[in-house]
Image: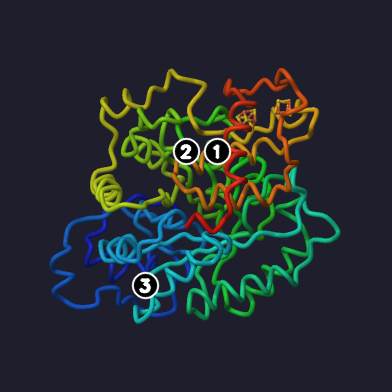
Amino acid sequence: MNHHNSQVGRRQFLKKGLAGAAGFGVLTLSGQASVARDASQTEEKKGTFPARVLGRTGIRLPIVSMGVMNSDNENLVRAALDAGLIHLDTAHVYQRGRNEEMIGRVLKGRPRDSFVIATKVLGEPRDRRTGLFSAETKAEPFLQKFDLSLQRLGLDHVDILYLHNVQYRDSVLFEPLLKALETIKKSGKARFVGVSTHGNMSEVLNVAAESGFYDVVLTSYNFRDQNLEALEKAIARAAEAGLGVVAMKTQAGVYWDREKTEPINMKAALKWALRNPHIATAIPGMTAFDQLSLNLEVLSDPAMTPEDWESLHLERKVGGLYCQQCQTCLSQCPAGLPLPSIMRSYMYAYGYGNLGAAHDLLSSLELPDALCADCGECRVTCSQQFDVKSRVTDIARLLRTPREFFA
Ligand code: SF4
Ligand code: SF4
């Protein structure tokens, strides 16, 4: 019941969507929807949107939302909102806070019930190699960082707060942070809480589903995932347990190659993720108006065509820029390098063109100076057949450039 896939007229969507879900018997945004800021706008934007309900939150969303991470363009975010992509996804760490501040400027003056905003906060400290929390990981810094996020956004509450980037059962259930999330939810500063994951996603989804604690899960999900069967099972299970499942990294690294000669077919990749009815909405990253247009085209016609299927090159099992975060490499590297994170940074740089995010991630890893220098031949066999040493030494060059050169 939770993930009805339905065509909703824009007017209806605006009226019902946010006030929404009466038919689903669940609570929704407190205010009645007033998404349209003036009647003419509503008239102009008739048409239909496929919308789905975000699990037990009852929030009804267009199946396409906006991942804001790589964008610093207020006008693009405004245009997305005005076109009906009312759900924006950001995080405390994106662009060192400027992403939330930029969104705050866009949201200023907009009716609070006209958008749905999600942010994410990392539990810290965490092990630089495995990402695991420790006895030092406490609730207080998490609460403080979240308060700062609200300040930057200029809001007194967000709709969804995610515990950012977790990979293991123990992290999903890490008590000090569960308490922090609970405190925040009780205070009304976040209407719903969730967990986000881009490694070991099936475990995270399964544990989140069992926990009964979370309302939403944000998971990597794309046509390139090497464990699709397990992942889709876990997604279904989470959805059936009432979690709203949001898909990210649907574009699978954006390019097949570092030189950007072969882009992934973004429309087909997004449609591929949305064909799964358990995905309530996807948050493709957008940095340009033509990407927004493409994603709106998908929103209005999400069915995959035979050409779409073909263009995804499903027969290609390895390669590309998308690191599966499978951790196969972790135990193989004698230097103990946090390779999955380094590879994610590589994808941010070459796939997303976001050198700032790549630099931030790399610097957070406290890497030694001369990476791979003592190794001769690389001992790592990557499940995607990446040439790990050359990627590591290539991306490590970024660290020699001061951060202020990047947005
Ligand atoms: S670098 Fe390769 S082995 Fe390591 S996590 Fe990524 S895909 Fe898996
Ligand atoms: S060359 Fe390979 S095995 Fe050696 S440190 Fe670099 S990544 Fe690790």
* Residue marked by disc 2: 350
Q: Position of residue 197 (x, y in %)?
A: 60, 47
The foreground one among 104 and 282 is: 104
Of mark 3 and mark 1, the one earlier in the sequence is 3
Above or below 307: residue 53: below
* Residue marked by disc 1: 346
Q: Can residue 1 be seen in this view?
A: no
Of mark 2 and mark 3, the one earlier in the sequence is 3
Task: Inspect the image, locate mark 1, and give the three-letter code of the amino acid beneath it.
Answer: Tyr
Left or right, 316 with reference to 109:
right
The foreground one among 16 and 195 is: 195
Q: Are marks 1 and 2 in contact (CB under 8 Å)?
A: yes
Give me the residue at 68% from left, 74% from top.
144
| Type of colouring | rainbow
* Residue marked by disc 3: 106
Q: Position of residue 161 (x, y in %)?
A: 57, 65
Give me the residue at 26% from left, 55% from top.
49
